[in-house]
Image: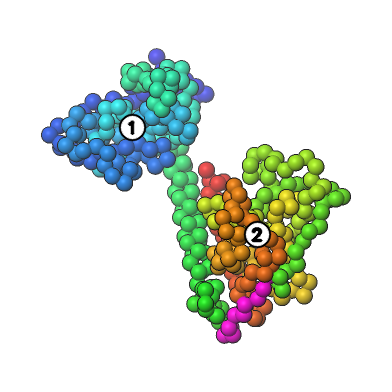
Amino acid sequence: MRIKIDGWEQRKLNEIADKVSEKNKNNEFSEPFTNSAEQGIISQKDYFDREIVNNENLNGYYIVRNDDFIYNPRISVTAPVGPINRNRLGRNGVMSPLYTVFRTHDIDNLYLEFYFKTTRWHRFMKLNGDSGARFDRFTISSTQFMEMPIPYPTLEEQQKIGEYFESLDHLITLHQRKCEQTKTLKKYMLQKMFPQDGEKVPQIRFEGFTEDWEQRKLGDLVDRVTRKNQDLVSELPLTISAQYGLIDQNEFFDKRVASKDVSGYYLIENGEFAYNKSTSTDAPWGAIKRLDRYENGVLSTLYIIFGIKENNPVDSDFLVSYYSTNLWHKGIHEIAAEGARNHGLLNIAPADFFATRLMIPQDIEEQKKIGKYFIELEALITLHQRKCMTSR
């Protein structure tokens, strides 16, 4: 008996697919596949950077043909009952008998593939299977698995649904690719548009500028900010992330780390910079970021805060770009107390920090062009990231 749900039929998986029991013989197929929740069906060699199964031991493995579906019982955070993916590799291979392989008929493969990207089928698995026997593997009999109910609209509607989500996937991939290309370009230009150690001009610069860059002490360009939040102008506690810059603690940590009373914290205004002396893999000498997201906020007095001097000897956007390079790391390395990292916190005195030197163009217009260029690149990266997220 076929049941209709909101006008759609419901079919059991064994009505629209056959479990594959075809075994590999005489090593007819020699490429073992694996099923990754993130990457789908992929060659075992590509996924593990090696083959974990000797080719001589592939007899008895299930033969996986192009467009076959594979269920992997291994569970993870992203696949709490294990993933089901379709073989899109365009070639045949083999899978361990620990996997369940099935071949469809009477259903659109794209539609079914995207159905298995939802969590709707998880309820059936949890009602009929068990994740307690092994903490990393979901247990369900293949017979019970093939009883899984599948929502079944008309073939035409299946095709339209599959094509729609396929087009969204292509759009996401496009924006991801453009985002990575722009990040690569930014990284390359940060290396080429600033003079390297010992040099006075960059390898790439804007037309019309020929003067040598000059070395300036940071303290000549900026003033230290030590204003306290005594009048509670702001109650927004901030942190500095190497990736996201100055950001609300609640958003970054998903909790507030600052104490309830922030009157003794530093008050930072939009456009001012802060140095976080905490080190990480992405920021081996800490991170220096400008406050762009909010009108103001508060920071622990462990941070060093500064603003550009009123006579504006340096362009703010240029400074943002400069501190996106690693050219300033050498100066920090020279003033950090030997062996003074305490839980990843560098011991750097403010006076020493402001004595560090940086190379800047003598012409403020060249600074502005460089700053604007990298701000626009960053905006392009953010745009592609946002489009990628809204397409998901």
Q: Residue furthest top?
A: 1
In the depicted structure, whether residue 121 falls above or below residue 161? above
Instruction: Measuring from the top left, give residue 84's x and y in whole percent.
Output: 38, 32
Whether residue 389 appears in magenta in the rendering, the answer is: no
In the depicted structure, whether residue 361 falls above or below residue 39? below
The residue type indicated by label 1 comes to Ile
Dot 2 falls on a residue whose secondary structure is loop
In the depicted structure, whether residue 351 falls above or below residue 48? below
Instruction: Measuring from the top left, give residue 122's x and y in whole percent.
Output: 46, 25
Residue drawn at the location 40% of the way across and 32% of the way down: 83
How many angstroms separate mark 2 from mark 1 (CA)? 55 Å
Q: Nearer the viewer, residue 141 or 67?
A: 141
Is 67 displayed left or right of 309 in the figure? left
Residue drawn at the location 78% of the way across and 40% of the way down: 260
Q: Dot 2, crowdedness within 10 Å: few (<14), some or many (≥20)?
A: some
Q: Residue furthest right?
A: 231
Instruction: Measuring from the top left, give residue 116's x and y in whole percent.
Output: 43, 32
Whether residue 215 appears in magenta in the rendering, the answer is: yes
Question: Between disc 2 and disc 1, whose residue precedes?
Answer: 1
Is 166 displayed left or right of 46 in the figure? right
Instruction: Measuring from the top left, give residue 374's x and y in whole percent.
Output: 58, 66
Is 33 displayed left or right of 83 in the figure? left
According to the image, label 1 marks what residue? 70
According to the image, label 2 marks what residue? 348
The residue type indicated by label 2 comes to Ile
Q: Nearer the viewer, residue 286 or 139?
A: 286
Residue drawn at the location 56% of the way across and 55% of the way down: 339
Which stretch did the figure color magenta? 209-218
